[in-house]
Image (tube, rainbow, N blue to C red):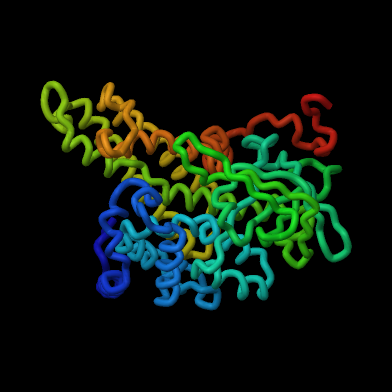
Amino acid sequence: MNFDDTPQEAEFRATVRAWIDQNAPKELADQLSQSGARKAVSGADFLKTAKAWQKKKADGGWACMQWPREYGGRDATPIQRVIWQQEEGNYIKLSQPFNIGQGMCGPTVMAFGSEKDKRERLPKLASGEEIWCQLFSEPAGGSDLAGLRTRAERDGDDWVINGQKIWTSGAHYSDYGLLITRTDPNVPKHQGLTMFFLDMKSPGVEVKPIKQASGESEFNEVYFTNVRIPDSQRLGNVNEGWSVSLTTLMNERMSIGARVATGFPEVFEFCNNLMLEDGPAIDDRAVRSKLATWAVRTSGLKYTSYRTMSALSKGERPGPENSIGKLVAGSTLQEIATYALELQGAAGVVSDPATADAAGEFQAMLLRSPSARIAGGTDEILRNIIAERVLGLPGDIRVDKDVPFNKIAVKGR
């Protein structure tokens, strides 16, 4: 394949490069080149900085490139989107607060929302004026999303919501959330679900941050106590929320797989500068073998994402093959962080950026890597999806497949 720019693509790239050169927050360039955007922009209000950059992109016509113009996008081709991402470089780290809304919630609203909702909500989502979260996982469900217990009961033109969600990224600063609920417990679990979107400031919504091992609190518990949502904010038909959620999940796995940093550039630079007992680490055959494996894997991830963009350009929705990128990226991140700490030896236990090797970036990377293998579907779930829906292998045995949800045996019942 020829990956050189065509004359039209080269012209577009020059336009992008000129705009970024003129508008990007260059005072943050050095900090953003470090691992971890939030820690890199030290002494600054990250959310305020991210919103300012997103608004500037939207005003210039560079936000949500693939979206239609009437919804805040640019109607860009997949290759134009790739060129933009390449040229935006490390400034893309400032998009972190908007990834869930723009990569997962927005496409779901676009597919199932009313025209009024799309024209009201999507431009604000694209510009960063509104931030969205995804309210899916529950404490008792584990990886079984369809086992959710948050209830939605009809009351006139409203629905009354009671229950709890967990591991909700960004809920503490989100304006809206995509919420999946159980509306009929008398049918098999995949058939009694309904999707809504709601204002996160609604009465009865309580957000509690979860303290992580890294000291940060990016995830949250969210409680719903008699929260009222108008039926006009329902996405899809009643009890058909599972089919709606598949659109979200496929976009989620595509989005996560495309943006999970594998850590390869960092470990490659680290090995180029590290001295082992018998010489430079980069001269060690075992080290070079590891680096070669990760280089090939990282390259494969990049071109797999290009293949997905090509499918999207033909009007296709993201498919189950996007689970491959997410599965590979998450495990690679953890492998690289673990190996880098092994190379550091006893010094690997030091995590203070002021004294640790490589400013402690691999220690921080290892602490956050498990979440990359859980968010958007665990490794086991993704392997099942790839086996069954990509390779066509027989599905796992499911004893609860045709059992009404309220008849499924649970502990203590």
Question: Residue pushed farthest front?
Answer: 43
Q: Toward the viewer: 42 or 279?
A: 42
Using residue 391 as the reference point, say whether residue 299 is left or right of it. left
Determine whether 181 is above or below 407 in the image. Answer: below
Relative horizontal placement of residue 247, taking residue 83 as reference (left or right) = right
Count of marks placed on residues: 0
Residue 14 x/y as whole percent: 25, 72
Q: Quadrant of the C terminus?
A: top right
| Residue 348 visible in this rendered orientation of the protein | yes
**Residue under the image location 31 percent in, 54 percent down:** 32
Residue under the point 55% across and 52% down: 170
Question: For this rendering, which residue is in front, 103 or 395?
Answer: 103
The residue lying toward the viewer, choosing from 404 and 364, is 364
Is 345 in front, or is 336? 345
Task: Decide: is 9 above or below 336.
Answer: below
Whether residue 192 is visible here, answered yes or no, is no
Q: Position of residue 373 (x, y in %)?
A: 49, 37
Q: Position of residue 42 (x, y in %)?
A: 35, 52
Residue located 42% across and 51% down the image: 258
Figure quadrant of the N terminus: bottom left
